[in-house]
Image (spheres, helix red, strand yellow):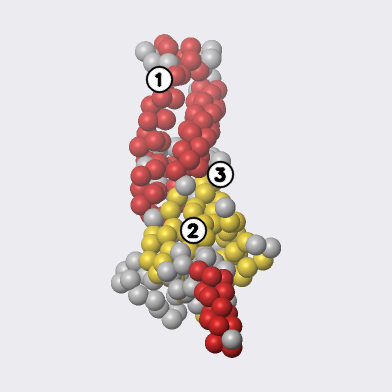
Amino acid sequence: MKKISVILLSIILVISLAGCGFRVKKADSALCGKWKANVNLSDKMYEGLKESLSTNLNFNDFNIDVIFEFKADGTFEIKADADSVAKATEKAVSDIRTAAEGILKKYADLLNLEGTVDEILTETGSSLDEALASIEEAFRKNLNSDRLFDLIAYKGKYKTDGNKLYFTQLSDGKFHDDIYDLFSIKDGQIILESTTDVDGFLTNSYPLTLKKF
């Protein structure tokens, strides 16, 4: 009878661990699943645009969702959410058209040119729509969403040690004692409070709040 009780206890223990965390440390099991963080990448996405577009445009926020997936086998994957990137891109295009139209109007006023911007451009054989379309084309070319996906895409192994979260590095696929995130779990959310990874693409976005979905 005692032997049967031990077997039953073992089965219950296995079942309780099978969902997530059976193959990783107990401390890591709370991380298992898919999480989403909203990240503002305005500075990174636009840092080269002012020079390439030869003008000083004021850009609004470029916010996207970044998906973190921690798996039970101790591996992870980070990627940009495609829908959020598409929405942010279209908003940015709209913002830049509005900003460009304002700049053209100020430029016309500065030169004391009479008439609307469209009327002035028509006299030069162009139009406001053509001018804005040209700016939009240059913007989309330099924004390069594909490059954004490549920069964020990241997979490997993870582990925890207390409140430290380690990821294997892209450079050599290894853990490094001095490269980690400080994290906490509060109200069912993961808070990536800070990181020692100075070269990470998301480093300037910390602290990051990851919400499970």
Label 3's element? loop
Label 2's element? strand
Q: Which residue is mark 2?
A: 68
Q: At label 2, which amino acid type do we have?
A: Phe
Residue 183 % position (x, y): 58, 70
Residue drawn at the location 53% of the way across and 81% of the way down: 7
Callout 2 crowding tier (Cα within 10 Å): few <14, some 14–19, many ≥20: many
Residue drawn at the location 42% of the way across and 16% of the way down: 127
Q: Nearer the viewer, mark 1 or mark 2?
A: 2
- The residue closer to the viewer here, 33 or 117, is 33
- The alpha-carbon separation of the residues under discs 3 and 2 comes to 22 Å
Residue drawn at the location 40% of the way across and 20% of the way down: 130
Label 1's element? helix
Residue 107 % position (x, y): 50, 26
Does residue 161 appear to the left or right of 125 in the view shown? right
The answer to whether 159 is drawn above or below residue 110 in the figure is: below
Residue 33 % position (x, y): 52, 60
Q: Nearer the viewer, mark 3 or mark 1?
A: 3
Does residue 83 appear to the left or right of 5 in the view shown? left
Disc marking residue 130? 1
Residue 175 % position (x, y): 39, 76
For marks 3 and 2 on the same chain, the one whose residue lies earlier in the sequence? 3
Q: At label 1, which amino acid type do we have?
A: Glu
Residue drawn at the location 53% of the way across and 15% of the way down: 116
Disc marking residue 61? 3
- The residue closer to the viewer here, 22 or 113, is 22
Q: How many marks?
A: 3
* Direction bottom: furthest residue: 2
